[in-house]
């Protein structure tokens, strides 16, 4: 048995190579490739059914990216010791690929399609997420599945002032721009990333730089498809249409739908009722025995509604809710709404509302990370929840889905840029955003509410952060376009772009862009970013009316933190045998104490709910690690009594001899009745034996000398 592998090599701008291999692995899939860069290897395999399921009028596409622990020589944790459900990181990579692939399939292709991407070999210096979309697109390129590609994604980072494509993991630590950009040969289609408050011009430069590298990767896929002989795609017929009915629906409803769109109703439910009334009126006009397919009528009316809304915006330059193109919906916000939390905020913009909380925990609350590529902990968490009632719907609660994980990650990336450095922040910070109403850009509402809640909690953030979602309506035939600020849910659904931008007044900290049309020009993208900046600054001004800077102190019920750095040799003394000492301190004071060894020092982190507990815990630890000093006075406890004196524990774990001659100024003949075991006694350290290190104590040194007896006159 033999196989014929076909390879294609891609050169990155700095000369590094990416190779695509097909014909060797997973040959029963419709298309499969192995993409290799350094020691990182991804296997992508795609299968698409030949026929669509009856009644399906969309593309049932699933994209799953999974990292095999064996790829980096690791065994998974947990009871089962095997790969289980996708981690949040794997879901985020899956979304990166899905978001650029899905719009590239033909609109009328509805066959169930599954894309699987496995990390089968891991290089600790090469991030696989920047290669996943290339692998997926290449698998489609060598298949007969209809696809309007190829596409690819690259990571673009600015490191030490220079833009780099797919930088190493170690170099990425110094980046002030870190973005994944996805595009076809013709245009950019997807952007997601984080930045250190950079300008719009710097972001555009990075996107353009990434697109040049993507063009090379797309051309390589076209050449690979030609080498494999897969330029001809399969024929399909997944839709049946009635052109006469389509025209009938259009003629009867277009103008009415246009008038509903132009009405400028601020309520989502009012607009929905208005469009439904137009559709229902048309159906009623057909009579009871009309014989038409209701599903087809609804499909055609949806097309009419979409066209009417888009044309109304392009022609009349107003929005569905009556706003101007660059106008932001009314905003109100409130902090300290939940008095028992460490920080809270309500942020409402139009019909979108987030109730967000901040909780400050200890190091014990850090999230453990165990993946094929990364092992460690995270001390900043952001969770986004989207209950069904936020859109007036009834749905079972099945926990966070991919959308919730993606939206939460975007908000996390926007806010983490203003947090204090880990070295200055003793807390594990958890932000939870519960979306209570949703009509457009709840992820950006989460950014705004999260920023307010952090300041309410007293976290010393560098600056406030706000976010805004931009939309786009275009008409290729006329060249008209309209950039929309603070888009509604309907405008997102019917529009050509969803561009979320978050940042401070100084610059952008995170972005996410999905484009549904080909050929987005630099002019349009530049205008969208400029309009987004104005909107972001407007929202920041509105937020500042509620709170403009972090509260000067944490809430009274927030755990207080105190750090003590001790010499390495004292770590064992603080912990004690089997943890006995530290457990006793925690029991006595109610504080939580965590000890880490870093840089040859012991770092003791103390958390307490009140100052008295904190002071007592600090005192006890300082007593343990304090160095005895000759001449200092201590309050000790008698541990044992001998004929020649008593042994006194004058510091935790440190005993000294209080000799019989040092107890009183008067001479003592015996120790009987002088001291008792357990008795507290004040002593002075008078000497340390240089050879043995034994401590010598004195009580008489701190007692007043008796007055001299005067002779009788």
Image (cartoon, grey):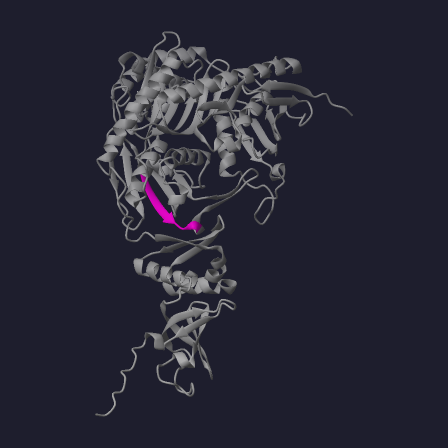
Is residue 664 depicted above or below 683 in this figure?
Answer: below
Q: Bounds of the magenta span?
A: 355-363
Q: Residue at x 37, y 67 (%)?
A: 631
Q: Is residue 474 magenta?
A: no
Q: Magenta region's main secondary structure?
A: strand
Return the x and y of residue 59 as percentages of the image width and height: 50, 24
Q: Tell me the quarter of the image containing the C terminus.
A: bottom left
Q: Residue at x 42, y 13 (%)?
A: 245
Q: Let me know if residue 283 appears in the view.
A: no
Q: Quarter holding the N terminus?
A: top right
Q: Is residue 361 within the magenta segment? A: yes
Whether residue 291 sits left or right of residue 117 in the image: it is left
- Give the vertical position of 647 relative to 54 (above or below): below
Instruction: From the top left corner, tell me how far across and down residue 399 is, in percent.
Output: 44, 41
Residue at figure coordinates x 40%, y 51% from the top left: 362
The answer, for residue 458, to whether it is visible in the render is: yes
Q: Nearer the viewer, residue 135 or 473?
A: 135
């Amino acid at each position: 048995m033999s196989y014929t592998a076909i390879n294609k090599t891609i050169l990155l701008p700095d000369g590094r190579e990416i190779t695509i291999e097909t014909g060797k692995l997973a040959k029963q899939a419709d298309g499969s490739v192995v993409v290799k860069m350094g020691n990182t290897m991804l296997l992508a395999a795609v299968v698409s059914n030949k026929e669509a399921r009856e009644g399906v009028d969309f593309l049932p596409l699933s994209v799953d990216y999974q990292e095999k622990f064996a790829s980096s020589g690791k065994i998974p944790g947990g009871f089962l010791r095997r790969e289980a459900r996708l981690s949040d990181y794997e879901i985020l990579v899956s979304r990166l690929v899905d978001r650029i692939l899905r719009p590239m399939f033909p609109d009328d292709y509805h066959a169930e399609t599954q894309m699987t991407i496995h990390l089968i070999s891991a290089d600790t210096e090469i991030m696989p997420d920047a290669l996943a979309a290339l692998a997926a697109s290449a698998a489609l390129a060598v298949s007969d599945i209809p696809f309007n590609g190829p596409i690819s994604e690259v990571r673009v980072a600015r490191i030490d002032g220079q833009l780099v494509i797919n930088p190493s993991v170690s170099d990425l630590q110094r980046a002030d721009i870190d973005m994944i950009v996805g595009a076809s040969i013709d245009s950019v289609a997807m952007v997601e990333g984080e930045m250190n408050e950079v300008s719009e011009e710097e972001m555009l430069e990075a996107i353009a730089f990434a697109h040049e590298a993507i063009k090379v990767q797309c051309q390589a896929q076209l050449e690979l498809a030609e080498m494999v002989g897969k330029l001809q795609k399969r024929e399909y017929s997944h839709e049946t249409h009635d052109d006469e009915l389509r025209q009938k629906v259009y003629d009867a409803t277009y103008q009415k739908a246009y008038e509903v769109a132009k009405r400028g109703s601020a309520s989502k439910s009012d607009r929905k009722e208005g469009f439904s009334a137009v559709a229902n009126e048309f159906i009623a006009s057909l009579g009871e025995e009309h014989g038409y397919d209701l599903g087809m009528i609804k499909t055609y009316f949806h097309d009419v509604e979409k066209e009417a809304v888009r044309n109304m915006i392009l022609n009349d330059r107003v929005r569905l809710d009556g706003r101007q193109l660059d106008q932001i919906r009314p905003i109100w916000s409130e902090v300290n709404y939940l008095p028992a939390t460490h920080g809270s905020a309500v942020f409402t913009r139009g019909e979108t509302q987030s109730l967000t909380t901040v909780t400050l925990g200890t190091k014990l609350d850090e999230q453990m990370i165990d993946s094929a590529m990364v092992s460690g902990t995270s001390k900043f968490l952001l969770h986004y929840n989207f209950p069904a009632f936020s859109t007036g719907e009834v749905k079972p609660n099945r926990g966070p889905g991919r959308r919730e994980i993606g939206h939460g990650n975007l908000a996390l990336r926007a806010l983490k840029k203003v947090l204090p450095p880990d070295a200055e922040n003793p807390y594990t910070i958890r932000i939870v955003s519960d979306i209570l109403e949703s009509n457009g850009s709840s992820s950006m509402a989460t950014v705004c509410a999260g920023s307010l809640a952090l300041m309410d909690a007293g976290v010393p953030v560098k600056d406030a952060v706000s976010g805004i979602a931009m939309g786009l309506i275009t008409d290729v035939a006329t060249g008209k376009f309209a950039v929309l600020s603070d888009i509604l849910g309907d405008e997102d659904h019917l529009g050509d772009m969803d561009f979320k931008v978050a940042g401070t007044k100084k610059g952008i900290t995170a972005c996410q862009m999905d484009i549904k049309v080909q050929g987005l020009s630099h002019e349009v993208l530049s205008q969208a970013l400029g309009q987004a900046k104005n909107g972001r600054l407007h929202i920041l001004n509105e937020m500042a009316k509620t709170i403009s800077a972090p509260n000067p102190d944490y809430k009274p019920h927030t755990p207080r933190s105190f750090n003590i750095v001790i010499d390495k040799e004292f770590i064992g003394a603080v912990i004690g045998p089997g943890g006995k000492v530290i457990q006793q301190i925690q029991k006595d004071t109610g504080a939580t104490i965590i000890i880490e060894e870093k840089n040859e020092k012991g770092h003791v982190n103390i958390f307490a709910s009140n100052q008295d507990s904190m002071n007592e815990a600090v005192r006890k630890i300082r007593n343990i690690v304090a160095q005895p000093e000759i001449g200092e006075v201590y309050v000790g406890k008698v541990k044992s009594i001998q004929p020649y004196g008593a042994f006194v524990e004058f510091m935790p774990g440190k005993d000294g001899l209080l000799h019989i001659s040092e107890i009183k100024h008067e001479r003592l003949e015996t120790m009987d009745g002088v001291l008792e075991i357990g008795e507290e006694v004040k002593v002075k350290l008078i000497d340390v034996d240089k050879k043995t290190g034994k401590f010598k104590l004195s009580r008489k040194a701190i007692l007043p000398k008796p007055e001299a007896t005067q002779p009788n006159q």
